[in-house]
Image: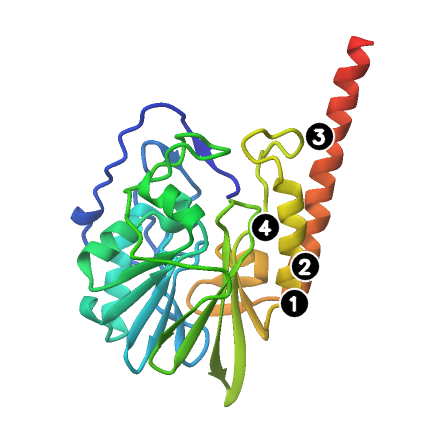
Amino acid sequence: MRRLKHRVGLLPLLVSVFFLSAVSAETALPQLQAYEVPADWRTPVKPLQIADQTWQIGSKSLTALLVKTGNGAVLIDGGMPQMAEHLLSNMQALDVAPEDLKWILHSHGHADHAGPLAAIKNASAARIASNAESSRLLARGGAGDLHFDDGLLFPSVSVDRYLQDGEQIVLGEVTFTVHFIPGHTPGSMAWTWRDSLNGQEIDIAYVDSLTAPGYQLIGNVRYPNIVADFHRSFDRISALPCDLLLTPHPHASGWTYGDKALRKKSVSCSKYAENAQRVLQEQLNKQEQQIREINDNFD
């Protein structure tokens, strides 16, 4: 969650997802009144092939993955709420009808990734799988977020299958394994599965954001173990099977989405965790310095 602008309050956010007409892949979809984001977060892309069975079908700067199997397809994340019709259109372009979508998985319950999941679920045969932490945020449509309160609302959606850490979802020949990596949210998740690329079997890891944008890291009564959770998650991510890393915000893993999905630089899971750990420590050091300065003023 970066470069966001939101207005906090009681916000009408029953977005007009169901009334969007077809939009050019180069035209940014409308802003939401309550949660404004950069245009490239809302600019659709055509289906972009990542691996033999894995496709990016979201926007230029938000990942939404479609994994096709012999028994149907799986969607992982969706982007902003106004992306629903675009996602369904891209699925159709890949010969995936709404009834062929069997599962919806996700990284965490913020509006820029879980926004259209309710609309996709309603339009398809898909079931949503999530963990207990994220399921509560999905059910509230983002309300009462630990860090953003009611600033990132989206259409609420119910979970059909509650996951335990390390649990697997099998569809056709593909097995998806969930890994709990709390930090960005208490319910943050990574997903791993096997695919093939250029004739080689590979392990794909889709790993949630590792940022703490504006978060209170010290003395956070609503999330007192946030720093410890981040550090445990860094260790877990470094150990994931990870020949190819994908992230909800593609630039974090070296990807750009345009006419093609290009891996501008190779970022391993361990490097991704290392980079995030360095940034978190800098943020922590800054907050500690601010606390010392406040205490010095009272001495």
Task: State the CA–CA distance, disc 2 to disc 4.
Answer: 12 Å
Instruction: Identify which residue is drawn at 39% across, 36% down.
Output: 152
Can see residue 22?
Answer: no
Image quarter of the C terminus: top right
**Three-letter amino acid code of the residue under disc 4:** Leu
The answer to whether residue 42 is above or below residue 13 is: below
What residue is shown with label 1? 239
For the residues carrying marks 1 and 4, which lies nearer the camera in this image?
1
Q: Within the image, what quadrant is residue 202 found in?
A: bottom right
Contact check, label 1 and label 2, Cβ < 8 Å: yes
x and y, in percent, of residue 295 in the image: 78, 16
For the residues carrying marks 1 and 3, which lies nearer the camera in this image?
1
Q: Which mark is residue 235?
A: 2
x and y, in percent, of residue 89 in the image: 24, 63
Task: State the CA–CA distance, disc 3 to disc 4.
Answer: 18 Å
Task: State the CA–CA distance, disc 1 to disc 3.
Answer: 29 Å
**Three-letter amino acid code of the residue under disc 3:** Gln
**Three-letter amino acid code of the residue under disc 2:** Asp
Q: Residues within 10 Å of mark 4 (few under 14, many from 20)?
A: many
Instruction: Identify which residue is drawn at 52% across, 85% down.
Output: 201
What residue is shown with label 3? 287
Does residue 63 appear to the left or right of 232 in the view shown?
left
Q: Within the image, what quadrant is residue 234 found in?
A: bottom right
Q: Does label 2 or label 3 sit earlier along the sequence?
A: 2
Does residue 19 appear to the left or right of 203 in the view shown?
left
The answer to whether residue 78 is above or below residue 176 is: above
Contact check, label 2 and label 3, Cβ < 8 Å: no
Q: Residues within 10 Å of mark 1 (few under 14, many from 20)?
A: few
Contact check, label 1 and label 3, Cβ < 8 Å: no
x and y, in percent, of residue 212 in the image: 59, 41
Can see residue 169?
Answer: yes
